Amino acid sequence: MPSVAERSHENVQDTQPLSIVKEQREPCLLTDEQEYLRAQGKLIRAAKRAARSELSVSRGEWRKHGWAKTDVLSVDGVKDHVKRCHASELSQEQFVELFERPRVPAVITGLTDNWPAQEQWTEQALLNRYRNHRFKVGSDDDGYGVRLKLEHFLAYLRDPEHCLDDSPLYIFDGTFGDRKGSRSMLWDYSIPSFFREDLMQHAGERRRPPYRWFVMGPGRSGSGLHIDPLATSAWNALLQGRKRWVLFPPGTPRNILLPPGIEREAVSWFYRMYPRTQQPDWPVARPISIIQSPGETVFVPGGWWHAVLNLDLTIAVTHNYASTATFDRIWAHTQRGRPKMSTKWLNTLRMLRPDLAAVVDAMRERGDDQLGLASSSSSSSSSSSSGSSSSSSSSSSSDDDEPRQQEEAPNAKRRRTDDDHADTALSQPEHGPQDVK
């Protein structure tokens, strides 16, 4: 005969509603949408772990500084004194003599007015066209690309779990023009005439360094302080959002701009280092500041240190290029940084641009073919996503609103495996991430 306690327990069980009893016995089944979102979240967290292995996602280390709750994105008091010109009021010769040859930064307006990208590169339009295309959002510890579908990247930007990240993931994709799924983006813009000379093309498409990037990222993402590789110049055309730039002239000592203990992400540099540059005892030239708005194109001359902080969701395209006006300096850097490529480049120049080959011969005779190499030594970093997001790259890496490849020639294995860590198609969401760390 059951005890009083046992009978009492039986009575409680008997009086429980059927729905509660059933809930205890059967696991709750997720809807297809819930399953998809759960798998999507796994992919996003996996991409973050791959891009910043030193930060724990589960312990909240991506938000440890709390920069989302500071005024780091405020531009109150920032003075933008850079020269601005409308494209219609500037000839090619004037651009070369005023900006390119003397290496003077500038902002040119009106260059993007007739681009299809004005309509095709909005957040919604890009999602409609490239929802399932995988864009590069960072690099892992071995330098291999970390990729996410655009749909997942945009979900990351809106997710409360991630929107407070100190230095968010950031699309900085240097192969968008080569990959089948995104090659059509090349039709959405045209290289402005001021930057159209492309001497590196004579090195061959397989040998030349990466030179064009599609860039998209939220506030607090960006590029840490760096110098672009091989003394090349760069242009950055902004379609959406605002970017904050600082630029230091060539020859500014690296140890002053990047002292020990300063993290390399853009948001960290702007928060910790920029205020120092405004103090009376700042030992070198103060930086040039630029607040870039949609429709503006920033020209960054070779050799200039620069860092970029996105103030809100930005969409841009950026190119590095080599021109006749600064060829001597570019040659000196390329000969040292990419010796094999420089030899083949020179052989082609002898056939197609004998005038430039003559410049090289004259430099060698004078013994000045190592011109200005000291200023090329730099470290690059970007927000946690681009290129070598969290950690600094080797010297002379680039990221002009973001990081570039290292100056030394990339090995064949790395070039073939740029899609490592691409996210899965989610056709079987219960499997979770398969090829993302």
Image (cartoon, rainbow, N blue to C red):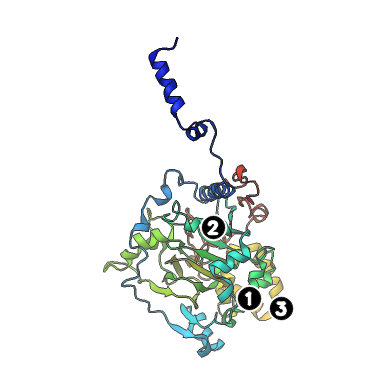
Q: Nearer the viewer, residue 23 or 422?
A: 23
Q: Which residue is mark 2?
A: 153
Q: CA distance from mark 3 to mark 1?
A: 13 Å
Q: How many numbered marks does the figure carry?
A: 3
Q: Quadrant of the C terminus?
A: top right
Q: CA distance from mark 1 to mark 2?
A: 32 Å
Q: Describe the element under mark 1 as helix, strand or loop.
A: loop
Q: Is any atom of residue 16 visible in this view?
A: yes
The furthest residue to the top = 1
- Residue 32's label in the rendered image is none
State which mark lies toward you, 3 or 2: 2
Q: Which residue is mark 3?
A: 352
Given the image, on which type of amino acid does mark 1 rest? Answer: Asp
Q: Residues within 10 Å of mark 3 (few under 14, many from 20)?
A: few
Residue 220 picture location, percent across and down: 42, 61
Seen in the picture, residue 140 relative to 381 is either above or below; the reply is: above
User: Does label 3 or label 2 sit earlier along the sequence?
Assistant: 2
Given the image, on which type of amino acid does mark 3 rest? Answer: Leu
Given the image, on which type of amino acid does mark 2 rest? Answer: Phe
Seen in the picture, residue 218 relative to 99 is either above or below; the reply is: above
Q: Describe the element under mark 2 as helix, strand or loop.
A: helix
Q: Which residue is mark 1?
A: 198
Residue 38 picture location, percent across and down: 54, 47
| Residues marked 1 and 2 touching at CB (< 8 Å) | no
Seen in the picture, residue 22 relative to 145 is either above or below; the reply is: above
Q: Nearer the viewer, residue 365 or 281?
A: 281
Q: Residues within 10 Å of mark 1 (few under 14, many from 20)?
A: few
